[in-house]
Amino acid sequence: MDIQPLTTQETVTADRRWLMSTFGTETNKTITLDTSTFTEHTHWLPTNRHVNQRVLKSGLPLGRITASGLYGIYDSAATDGREVFAGLLETETAYNPTSTKVGAALRIIGDIDASKLPVAFTPPAAANRTDSLHFSNLA
């Protein structure tokens, strides 16, 4: 048997153009995501031929799934708890495609440029939010 190790290097720059200031960075919450609620190309980038991982885009709106306590993509039409907006995914988050859960950071305080989020988003009414984010440049 001949084993040939493969070494790769990838540089990723955090894309947080949606973040208007660093205010609130120290208040991020540690959460666990349910990866089944995210969609390829919309929420995460597919693996490349060298590295078997997915990368969730920073700035994705999230909601907490009531039954599991995990977080998933915010959906105003959901009935599992994700219809209540909890905050934004703070940074790009890489995970193995076979993982069903992944640790992440949830931004709950700060000034956000809604026009630069990776998905179209209209903040819900205060009754359907648990965050303290301020959104500017709403479409």
Image (spheres, rainbow, N blue to C red):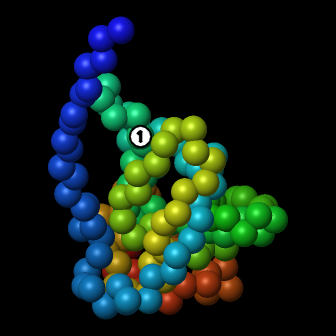
Residue 115 showing in the rendered view: no
* Left or right of residue 57: residue 116: left
Query: Where on the picture, by quarter, is residue 14?
Result: bottom left
* Left or right of residue 95: residue 47: left
Quadrant of image for the N terminus: top left
Circle 1 SS class: loop
Query: Where on the picture, by quarter, is residue 79?
Result: bottom right
Q: Nearer the viewer, residue 82 or 55?
A: 55
Q: Nearer the viewer, residue 52 or 106?
A: 52
Mark 1 residue type: Gln
Where does the image place residue 101, in percent across and percent down from the top left?
61, 54
Where does the image place residue 10, in percent across and percent down from the top left?
20, 44
Compared with residue 27, is residue 20 higher up or lower down, i.e. above or below?
above
Q: At 38% from the left edge and 89% from the top edge, which residue is drawn? A: 26
Quadrant of image for the C terminus: bottom left
Residue 138 showing in the rendered view: yes
Q: At 22% from the left edge and 34% from the top edge, which residue is drawn? A: 7
Q: Residues within 10 Å of mark 1 (few under 14, many from 20)?
A: some
Compared with residue 135, is residue 12 higher up or lower down, i.e. above or below?
above
What residue is pinned by disc 1?
53
Q: Nearer the viewer, residue 26 or 60?
A: 26
Which residue extends farthest top?
1
* Left or right of residue 32: residue 51: left
Compared with residue 65, is residue 22 higher up or lower down, i.e. above or below?
below
Query: Where on the picture, by quarter, is residue 137?
Result: bottom left
Q: At 19% from the left edge and 41% from the top edge, which residue is drawn? A: 9
Where does the image place residue 55, in percent across and percent down from the top left?
39, 48
